[in-house]
Amino acid sequence: ARKGKTPEEVVKKYLQKVKSPPEEDCTICMEPLGGPSGYKGPGVGPVSRAESVGRLAQCGHQYHFQCLVAMYNNGNKDGSLQCPTCKAIYGVKTGNQPAGKMEYHVIPHSLPGHPDCKTVRIIYNIPPGIQGPEHPNPGKPFTARGFPRHCYLPDSEKGRKVLRLLLVAWDRRLIFSVGTSSTTGESDTVIWNEVHHKTEFGSNLTGHGFPDPGHLDNVLEELRAQGITEDDGLM
Ligand code: NAD
Ligand code: ZN
Ligand code: ZN
């Protein structure tokens, strides 16, 4: 159903009308909300007075309607919208992670800092391929380095909760993305998205290992920023 919706219709669904815009600037285009959108890109049609400014229904932040449509068009157009100010998510956010496989199993060893439980190992495997329309350079190849990537979680109650939510994140294509690696500088390659993973098992030489007492709470917070909360893990 969402495929049939135009960008304007998607954006409108999450907005309330604003009769008199406040004397503030739109933080997308930095122009006053009382005047026209500063967005000059392609596809800007005429906007009626009534829909020139909208208020996002949950968080209340206000923007030019046209600026929100432009922002939506710059994303992967999945029917969801994220407030650029407070990151509130409208609809279900999905990403552009390429096709691949996520597997996990228990290994009978403890992680540093988690002496009382075994360990869950997650194995991500993504092969190289050709970028789709949702990627930075559609039609161009992308590389995939260091796969399979092995990641570790304590097999505790909280670790299992994180695992359930990571499975949801995987299905929504939010674990990896295609872009420029900040580690290697390589562009058009598969990179971690904004959810941290521990890739070192028995030590912490890379900074991506254990012990790290805050790790599980950090990951839960990062998942929340992607719109994935504890309710999602109950399915
Ligand atoms: P990136 O360097 O753009 O970083 C994105 C995020 O991932 C950052 O938050 C960063 O802190 C985190 N990150 C970086 N290295 C990590 C690691 N080893 N374990 C867990 N998190 C890490 O993202 P990227 O290019 O996907 O990550 C770099 C990592 O990918 C390398 O350390 C390696 O594990 C793998 N890699 C391997 C090769 C190879 O040829 N074997 C090449 C490139 C990347
Ligand atoms: Zn604007
Ligand atoms: Zn907001």
Image: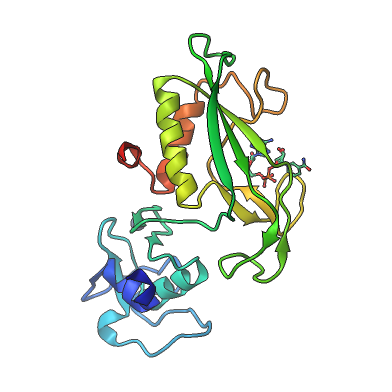
Q: Residue at x 40, y 42 (%)?
A: 224
Q: Is residue 67 left or right of residue 113?
A: left
Where is residue 35 shown, x and y percent of the image?
37, 81
**Which quarter of the picture shows residue 192?**
top right
Question: Does 224 appear above or below 45?
Answer: above
Q: Is residue 29 visible?
A: no
Q: Is residue 182 visible?
A: yes
Q: Nearer the viewer, residue 227 or 30?
A: 227
Q: Quadrant of the N terminus?
A: bottom left
Where is residue 64 shown, x and y percent of the image?
37, 74
Q: Residue at x 50, y 52 (%)?
A: 173
Question: Does 86 appear above or below 3?
Answer: above
Question: How was this image coloured?
Answer: rainbow
Q: Residue at x 59, y 53 (%)?
A: 177
Residue ranking furthest to the top: 116
Q: Quadrant of the C terminus?
A: top left
Q: Nearer the viewer, residue 161 or 11?
A: 161
Where is residue 6 shown, x and y percent of the image?
37, 78
How many numbered circles does the render carry? 0
Q: Is residue 22 left or right of residue 32?
A: left
**Which quarter of the picture shows residue 16?**
bottom left
Question: Does 166 appear above or below 74?
Answer: above
Residue ranking furthest to the bottom: 46
Q: Quadrant of ligand 1?
A: top right
Question: Does 98 appear above or below 139?
Answer: above
Q: Residue at x 39, y 76 (%)?
A: 7
Q: Is residue 228 left or right of residue 136?
A: left
Where is residue 78 shown, x and y percent of the image?
43, 65
Q: Nearer the viewer, residue 107 or 50?
A: 107
